[in-house]
Amino acid sequence: MSLNRANNPFPSLDAPTLANPSAEDLESWVDSPAFDANCQIKAQELRKALDPPCSLLRTLASPTATEVNFGVSPLEAAFYYAGLNLKGLWPRLICRDSPDVFIPPTGPNEYFREMRLENVSDNHQWVTTGTRCGTRSETTYTAELLIKEKICVSSVDFVAFSILHYAEGRELTPEAEEEARSDDEVVEDPTEVQDNDDDDEALDEAYAALPVAKKKEEGKREYTDATVWIGILADTLDYARALEIIGRIGSFISYVSSVKVNIAFRESMAQPLVTQALYPPAEFGDYLREFIDNVSVALSLPIAGRRTDMQGTMGPYFQWNGDLYALTARHNLFLSNDGNTEYIYHPSSPKREVVLMGENAFEAYKTAIQARISNLNDTVKALDLRIASLQQRIENGINVDEAQAKLTELQAEHLKTKNMIKALKKFFVTLSGKWADLKDRVIGYVVWAPPIACGVGDNKYTVDLCVVKLNKRRFSKFIGNVLSLGESLVSIPFFSGLEFALTCSTFAGPELSETTLKELMYERIDGPSGFKYPKDGLLELSGMVTADDIENPNSLDGRGDRTRRVLKRGWKTNTTVGNLPRFMSFVRKYYISGTLESLELAILPHESQIGPFSRGGDSGAVVVSAIGEYIGVLTGGTNKGTDGTDITYATLFIYIWALILAKFPGANLYFEDIKAFLATN
């Protein structure tokens, strides 16, 4: 290809051409080729985002894998837990006593087996006895032993695993075909339907007569025994020492219980999920729907302190004495060197203002919009070519009826795409003008933040709480505590140090469609759920789940064991569905000043949803049940020091609300007459 600028078909990428214009020229700039070229650059930057680090050479060269873990092969240490998180983010194995054999791939093109976190089976003795892990002697003994032996434990979880072994290639014999047909439970002689498009009733009857399709995996899934899964800070425990501790824990469990339980150590750390006038929630069909939720009055707004660079998520709203408040996690808005004493706002002191998106998050948000515009521009070009081809086919008299029908469809899609580009450009102008300055994004200020504490009360829960008084004028379109399940970016990328984090390189539609969300919530047609996709994609929140409720799950997972499906919407991962086990987890966090220990709600990723339940930036998000009951507020999770979580931790909401009521007597999560409430100063 010629490098002559005059003959180069691609737009110039010179910085002067792409320089951002002044505010008064912004509206004309977004309609210029220079802006489209800028959007193309932004899209390319997102596509070039590096995958999470997963260098096998670096993995095998680490001291943990080669010098310390002489009882576990380097490949097994690095890839035993493959599948528990995104590529390269799963934890490293230190030691285990489970009987399964890890078989490494024999060549570069062979698949690694994939592991998945599971709830402990209903028939496990620790389930049938009706007691939760975390209050049992087994977990208490394990945690106390590890601390006594000066082991840097970060968490003790009670979970199970499943392992997907990919099937080897084989010849499909007639016997195998017959077996496959019998597995599908084909209904003999279903209702016959004539080839008549107007016979909708007969078609519906025929469809209803067919069996429900079963999900099939490409391989065999093996379920493990329940496991006491222990997280250890990286490079602090060798294999021999871990094996000794496993023996002592195993001996104690065997003494108090006859049930078989595996024990495993992994490298992991527990840490908070923090990272570096509003619109009403978008309606279905709104061209801005996939972007509007981050600047709307629905729950889970992305927030930051005006003078700090941490990014988190705002939790539920409440009213008190005629004013509007919201809660979030304290660590979202307070620096570690701010101290850990109770903060109470005094009118004579400067305000700790809270803004909608910090600087980096806001710039990344604009970048995501430009990348979306670039993708839509590419769509328009592709549609232009297809439309021209169909018009030529019609002129030549080739399949005219079929071509004309397709042409009409593509022309409508072309118009819709152009309108979407126009709407996004207008939205970009508004953001770049009226929302650009940090002061224009101030939505409130902190009024109360108790000190962060762990192991509080008889239930040993975590207190990580901050209350923000909101500017009611910025919430003039407020509609109460609703969780938006609608379209949005899969993940809004942002710069964090030298790493450019991104989970999706294209922004082509909703994060979870209505159909997908229903599938995740129900999973099995014979299992209760209670979930109904809400009108306009807005799930109204009401009621609270208690600790006793958690011990009695109300749905079924993929293999038929009882679980409780939960939802959350956070700034970084948007809407995700997870499993809430009936067992609490022991968590130990390490700070310069010492350690904090607590019992937490443990939330596992959904078995059919790729990726973690939460990531950095989701702290403060509310976790709700299938019918919109408050369950908990996210405070942190375990990982190996990177983004993403193996297990997400939350504090039971009913405990948090008790603290709110003690400080704000008469506070109310519900808004019966919102119009009258907003009318008061």
Image (cartoon, rainbow, N blue to C red):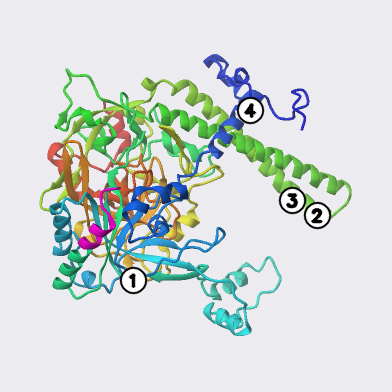
Please say if 364 is above or below 662: above
- Secondary structure found at label 2: helix
4 and 3 marks in contact (CB < 8 Å): no
Name the spot of residue 578 as percent of width and height, x first: 36, 56
Q: Give the amino acid at mark 2.
A: Asp
4 and 1 marks in contact (CB < 8 Å): no
Residue on which disc 3 sits: 406
Q: Which residues are magenta?
A: 235-245
Q: Residue at (20%, 61%) from the top-left corner?
A: 245
Q: Quadrant of residue 201?
A: bottom right
Q: Is residue 582 left or right of residue 476?
A: left
Position of the C terminus by quadrant: top left
Marks 1 and 2, how far apart at CA: 64 Å
Residue on which disc 1 sits: 99
Marks 4 and 2, how far apart at CA: 38 Å
Q: Residue at (15%, 68%) from the top-left corner?
A: 252
Q: Closer to the observer: label 4 or label 2?
A: 4
Name the spot of residue 351 as percent of width and height, x first: 24, 22
Q: Residue 184 versus residue 612: which sits nearer the camera?
A: 612
Q: Quadrant of residue 224?
A: bottom left
Can residue 280 be seen? no
Q: Give the amino acid at mark 1.
A: Pro
Marks 3 and 1, how far apart at CA: 58 Å
Residue on which disc 2 sits: 401
